Structure formats: C-alpha cells, structure tokens
Amino acid sequence: MSAPALSIEQLVGGYVVGVDILRGIDLRVNPCEIVTIIGPNGAGKSTLVKAAFGLAKVRTGRVLLDGDDVTGCRPNELVRRGIGYVPQRQNVFPTLSVRDNLMIGGITRTELIAERTERMFEVFPRLKEREKQAAGTLSGGERQMVAFARALMPRPSVLLLDEPSAGLAPRIVGEVFEIIQRVRDEANVSVLLVEQNARRALAISDRGYVLDQGMTAYEGTGTELLADPKVGELYLGGA
Amino acid sequence: MELLAEIGPWGAVATVAGIYAIFAMGLQVQVGHGGVDNFGQVAFFLIGAYASTILVEQHGMGLVAGTLAGMAIAMVAAVIVALPTLRLRGDFLAITTLAFGEILRNVAVNERGLTKGSAGIDAFTFRIDIVRELRRSLRDQDILVDRLAPLLILTWVLVLVVALVTWLLLRTPWGRVLRAVREDDAAVRALGKNAFAYRAQAMALGAAWAALAGTLYAWNQVHFSPSGFEPIVTFAGFVIIIAAGLGTIWGTVLMAILIQGVLIEGSRYWLDTGLPNAQEASLRYMVVGLALMLIVRFRPQGLFGSRAEMAAADE
Amino acid sequence: MDELAQAVLNSLTAGSLYALAAVGLTLVYGVLRLTNFAHGDMLTLGAYVGYAINVQWNLPLALAFVAAPVVVAAFAVGTEYVVWRPLRRAGAGLLQKLLMAIGLALFLRYAIQFVWGGDRDFYEIDNTATIAWVRDAFDLTLGFYDLLTIVISLVVLVGVALLLARTLLGTSMRALSDDVDLAESSGVDTDRTVVWTWALSGALVGLAGVLAGATINVYPTLGWDLLLTIFACVIVGGIGSAYGALLGSYVIAFSQEFLVLVVDDQRYKTTIGFVIMVLVLLVRPQGILGSKRAVN
Ligand SMILES: Nc1ncnc2c1ncn2[C@@H]1O[C@H](COP(=O)(O)OP(=O)(O)OP(=O)(O)O)[C@@H](O)[C@H]1O
Ligand SMILES: [Mg+2]
C-alpha cells in the first residue's frame, strides 16, 4: 500500500510552552480521501490543523507528507511541497482583487499561475464574473470559493479546510460540500476537513475522527461514526 | 569658612543631571505608570521654562509663584492634549505628542513678542536676586559659596521631593487604580472607574514635573532659546526611564545621573577622544542612540524593572 | 503672474517631494505595522550621498540619482537584518518598536553629523536656474530642480504604482499589508517580501533626499525636519495605503502653501501640516483612503 498523503503521529503541542492543547494524536489521510475531524468547541481541531501546517508548535510527534517528515517546516515550504490550507476565519485578502488573491495562491509555482487561474475560473464561474472585485466585498459563499481556489492554485496534494461552512447561509452550505467533493474527484486531492456541521461532513467523508480535549475519542468511517449511538449522543447533538 | 566654595565642572553637571531626573520622573509617571507613550514631554518642559520666565521677568511675579504657575499651565495643557489624543492608538499618540512639542517650539521661535524668538530670553532673577544676595550675606559672615551651588542644592532637594511625592502618590488608592488602568482598561471600566480620567491625570502629573524641571533649566541657563527644546530632550528622558526600567522611581534618579550626568554632560571631562568638540558631541549622541537600541533589544525591562512592565506598556 | 498661481506651482513641487518620501514610509507601515521614525534620517543620508558625489568628489549630481537610492536602500535592508527582524522574532511590542526606531534615527543622524559636520551645505549646482518659458509665458518662477522634482517623482511613482498593481512582488506586498498570517499560509516568502519592501522604501526616500538637497540644501536635520510633515501626508491619506500617501502629500502641500498665505507667515508652514494631521487623526484616523483594518 502506498504511503498516506498525510499522517500525524503521536502529536503533542500547542501555542505556548507548557500548555499542550494536543495531547498525543494519531491521524492519517490516504490519497484522495476526505477525512473529517469533529469535536466540541475548544477541542483543539483548529490547533491540530495548524500544527500540521507549521502554525502551531509541535513539541513531540511527527507530521509526514507522502511519507516525508515535514514536522516544523514553515508554511511557505509546506505549500511548495503540496499542502493547501484554508483557515477558519479571514481566509481571503480583502483589498486584493479576486484575480490577485489567486495569484498569491500560486506564488510558489509561478509557472502555473496563468493556466491555473483560468482553470479556477472554469471550476468557479462566479469568480470569473467578479475577477476584478476586491475580495472583501464578496458574499460569504463567494469568499469561501476564493479561499478554496487560492489554496488549489499550486495543485496541492493535500487540502486542509478549517470549518469551510461556518457562518454561511444554509443554502450555500450544501454548495460548499458539493464543491469539496468535486474538487476531490477532479483534482485528485486528499482533504482533511474540520466541521461543525458534523452530519453533513461525515456524510461526504470516507473516514472521520472525533477529537475531545486534545485526544482522539473515536475514529471510523463516515458511516460508522454516523451510526454509532455514543458519537451521536455526545457529539452530533442527539438523534 | 568655605562651603562649596568651588564646585567645579562636576557641580554644573550634577545640576543638569538633577533637572533631568525631575524631567524623566514626569515621563516615568506617564509612560511607566499611566501607559501613555508621550513623545512630546519636552513641550511641558518648554512651557515651564517660558511661562515661569515670562511671568517672573516681565510681569514681576515672585519666583515661587512663577514656578507654580508654570506647573499649573503645563498641567492644563496636558489635559487639553490628552482629551483628543489619549483615545488614539499607540503610535498615533506618539506622533501627535511629538508634533505637539514641535508646534510649541515653532511658536516659541515665531512669536517674538512673547518669547523673543530664536534670540532667546533671560531668566536672571534667581541668579541675581537670590544667589547674589545669599552669597553677599554669607560673605559678611566669612562663608564663601560657589555661585552655582545654591541651584545645585535646590535642584537636588527638589529631586528628592519629587521622587518622594511620586513614590507616595503611587501607593495611594489613586496610584493602584492607575496601575490597573495600564494593565487592563476593560477590568478597570468594569469597576466603574474612568480609565481615561486616570490616564489624563497621569499625563498632568508628569507635565507638572516636566514644567518644574523646565523652570530649573531656565534658572540654570540664565539665557535660553527654543533650540533647547528639541525632541532629543524627550528622547533623553526615554533613554533614562527605559534604562532604569519602566515603573521604577529611584532607578530613574540613578539613571539620570549616569546617563544625562556622566555620559551626556560629563563625558567631556573624563573622555578624551582627541576629536574636535563638534565631532565629540556627535559621537556622544551616537552612543545614546545605540544605547537605546541595545537596551530595547536586549534588556527591555531596564536595569531595575521587571519584564512584565514592558509587556504591560503595550496594552 | 499672481500669488495664487505661484502657490500652485510651489505646492506641486513640495507635494512631489513629500510623495516620494511618504510612499516608502507608508509601505513599510503597511507591510510591517512599523512606524519608522528613522525614515527622515534616511532621507538625510540620501542628501549627503549627493553631497559626497557632487561636492566632495566633484562628480556630476546626476550620478547621485542612482547612487543615493542604492546606498539608502542598502542601509534600509541592513536595518531589517540587524535590527528589525531580530526584534520581531523576539516578539517586541509597540513601545519597543517605537523606541528602537527613535534610537536608530538618533544614531543615524549623529553618525551623519559626525562624518559631514553640522553646517548647512549646498550642492555645486545652479539652483537659481529657472524654466524660461514658464517665466515668459506666465510670469511665474519654476526652478529647474523644482521641475526635475516634479518629473522624477511622477515617473518614479507611476513605476511604483505599476509594481504594486501588476507584479508578483507588488501583489505580495499588498497581501502582507492585508494579512501577514494569511500571506504566509498562502506560500508567500514573507521574509523576502519584507526585505524588498525595505529596499523600495529606502530607494524612494534616498531619491527624495537628493532632490531635497538640490531644492532646499543639506544639513543633518534636513530629514528629521521633514519627517513630521511626511507623517502628516501619510496619515491624512490613510496610513498603509500607497495611493493615500500620494494624495495626502498633495493635500498637505497645497494646504501649507495656501493656508500660509492666509496666516501670512511663512514660518508656520510646518505647523499647518501638523495641525491638519492632528485634525484628521481626531476625525478620521484611517485617513482619506486608508482602511479601518490598517489602524486597528
Ligand atoms: N493563538 C492561540 N494562542 C493560545 N491559545 C490558543 C490559540 N488559539 C487557540 N487557543 C486555545 O487552544 C484551545 C483549542 O482551540 P482550537 O481553536 O484548536 O479549538 P477548536 O476545536 O478549533 O474550536 P472551535 O470549534 O471553536 O473552532 C482553546 O482552549 C483555545 O483557547
Ligand atoms: Mg476551530
């Protein structure tokens, strides 16, 4: 079997020395899988994703990308190596035009910028209509598309998405999940997804993890977790 | 009998160091305790010097009354400056207060009717009425005193008074709330205290000390002009309080002696670089700039302060 | 012709000079959230590079228009490596940064004074030369070096605008101004972008230094005396915004030239700039074109 696209081994770490938010986490995303992390507020979901992306400190443990150890690499190095990250909040450059947002996304692979920008406009035709508009003036859903497209510019092999549906109108939430699936299918990218909309996220996921107080409480396929009565009661807000 | 019959150059240096100790104490109250990054402290120094001099020399006010009036005017000016600027973010506050100092210096240069402009103005009443009379009467009793000694003694008495008053004020409930304001505005507001008013009061107290220092400066100079009130005066004050450590009172006095006294004023007597005077002066201020950079980089808590003080200053 | 038309010409010259200096100051602020009090003294350095070339080495002043930007840019980049980057890594707060900039400003100014002395000096150029056709046609005085200032500033700032709008580097700078963390997460090499920002800022203010040396004269506090006016330009236009700095520069220059006619006292020109700045800060701290984001 080939190496996982992303794997996290025995990870302990956080933001400040002496306060470990993550307390020994193992997680793996196989090529072209969608893997979802759910868990209560403050469980450390965002921190886990940030630690994988070099934005939070890893005290012990490893992060492997395609079998290579990338623990502690700077974010721009990780982008160059094929990880894309869409943060939970403030994930577009508000005064930059849509086109310039994409250009920044492609900055590690400048030779691809022209071709990839056109490709992104095919995938997200709404963005083509707004290419000259400042990203800060877009609607929430459109902004999320800009953020996705920006992260997809350099053809990443792994995409880290932190609550992409947060704060969006219910009608658009469905659209976001469709986009995630489509991106996975068309761009052959593995997705690690953090979601509050746990049911919908698990429904499109191959596998999932439940994070609680910095540790993995449950793991399984999306269907298994949805069917597990304990998980349902504790983390999915009852039946 | 001889009593400080010849105080020599170091006596003059010590007077200036004392004046800066008072000046820096004002800055310490504002920056170290009130959390107001006032980059225009020299403005209140200027107000003290000019207001007391104009009142005493041109309007016949007494020396003590003139000094107190200078301090009062500086306090009013401080509140007026504080009203709009204290609401600004840190670096804008720094720029605006700096500009305030420069505007006043500009006014002092241009309003010749009031200040005699760049030609400068005389403040000789202290030197003549007090010092000359004092020396004359002492000489009659066969006691010789240097003509610079009275101001030296007066200055250092005032340094002690100012340090003590500041130290005591900061230990009153007022001082404790002021500290709390610096550390956390929101918590203080929750207690129903008006954080803004406390900062403005710190600004005013600091301005009063600066004005007192300004008056002493005028008496020491006898003749002075707007060129004595460049922003570098404020920055020297910052070097003193940062080197001492934000919040420290006695450290400020000690650093005023070391930095303004030994280093800036005194180095011409102990350091012989063999360079022409002008170049030596430039070198002195290069060292001051470098010292500020090194302290800020490697020991932001100063010699006597704690690291938390510098961190709290950024709230 | 008349006083007002002459004031317009003077405003254009002053505004063009301010703009060259202001754009660099605002770019550094935007990218690093750093208020660089040493910016004025970097201008002085540029002016003295011109002095060294033109007077001490007797070479044509034209050389200085290349040398001064290079030297000042190198100095600015040097401060990034020696001073600013280590300070950022140490997690320094606002007061620390402000005082560091002040320390650097003092050091640079007195180093200049140490080397070149404290007197006023002039370039060996004929700065009384005026443009004949302006005099003949309109009866107005436009010095040769005033015109040069306007033209150079215009050309250079159009170049800067293109750089910011069209190139990857310029877009990266704008991205950093918007959100450093997101820029880093998007793969931007932020360290490299910051270094280029310093280089650009230094080059622009070095060029402004030579022009100030030619149109005013050269002395150690030349840049410091202009600094608060330049802050005024930057703040009025909206700190962090390059177009704002440009606009603010002309707003300040025109206000100074025209209000000075009202006050009828040339010596209050600088003060007028400060007063406008303070008023803008009180009414609209983000300036004319700035974003609220940049001032929070
Ligand atoms: N930059 C930071 N510095 C220090 N502590 C932080 C920082 N960001 C988050 N934390 C702390 O880390 C813990 C985990 O936060 P995290 O954002 O990872 O939770 P989360 O699972 O993503 O929650 P949410 O569902 O609210 O997004 C929280 O206790 C939080 O207070
Ligand atoms: Mg989160």
Image (cartoon, coloured by chain):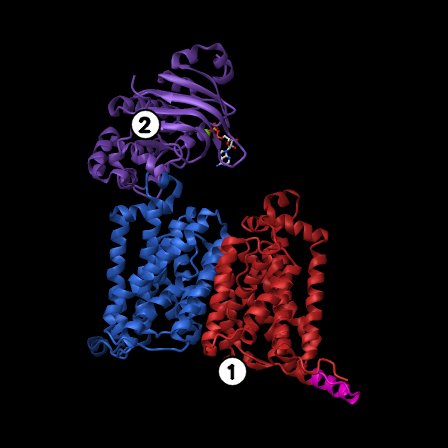
Chain colours: A purple, B red, C blue
Mark 1: C-beta under 8 Å from nearest atom of ligand 1: no
Work out whether residue C288 can be spotted.
Answer: no
Image point 63% across, 66% down: which residue?
Answer: B21
Q: Which mark is residue A158?
A: 2
Vertically, is A209 above or below B10? above
In which image quadrant can residue C63 be found?
A: bottom left
Q: Is residue A11 left or right of residue C195?
A: right
Q: Is residue B75 left or right of residue C37?
A: right
Image point 37% across, 70% down: which residue?
Answer: C257
- What chain letter is assigned to the residue under label 2? A
Amino acid type at mark 2 = Val
What residue is disc 1 on? B119
- What chain letter is assigned to the residue under label 1? B
Mark 2: C-beta under 8 Å from nearest atom of ligand 2: no
In which image quadrant can residue A202 be found?
A: top left
Looking at the picture, how far across and down is residue A135, in whole percent? 33, 39
Looking at the picture, how far across and down is residue C64, in whole percent? 27, 68
Q: Secondary structure at mark 1?
A: helix
Q: Tally the marks.
A: 2
Q: Nearer the viewer, residue C231 or B170?
A: B170
Magenta part of the chain:
B129-145
Looking at the picture, how far across and down is residue C232, in whole percent? 42, 61
Which residue appears farthest toward the right when viewing the image? Answer: B141
Q: Is residue C168 magenta?
A: no
Work out whether residue C213 can be spotted.
Answer: yes
Q: Is residue A145 left or right of residue B66?
A: left
Which residue appears farthest toward the bottom when viewing the image? Answer: B140
Q: Secondary structure at mark 2?
A: strand
Vertically, is B210 above or below A91? below
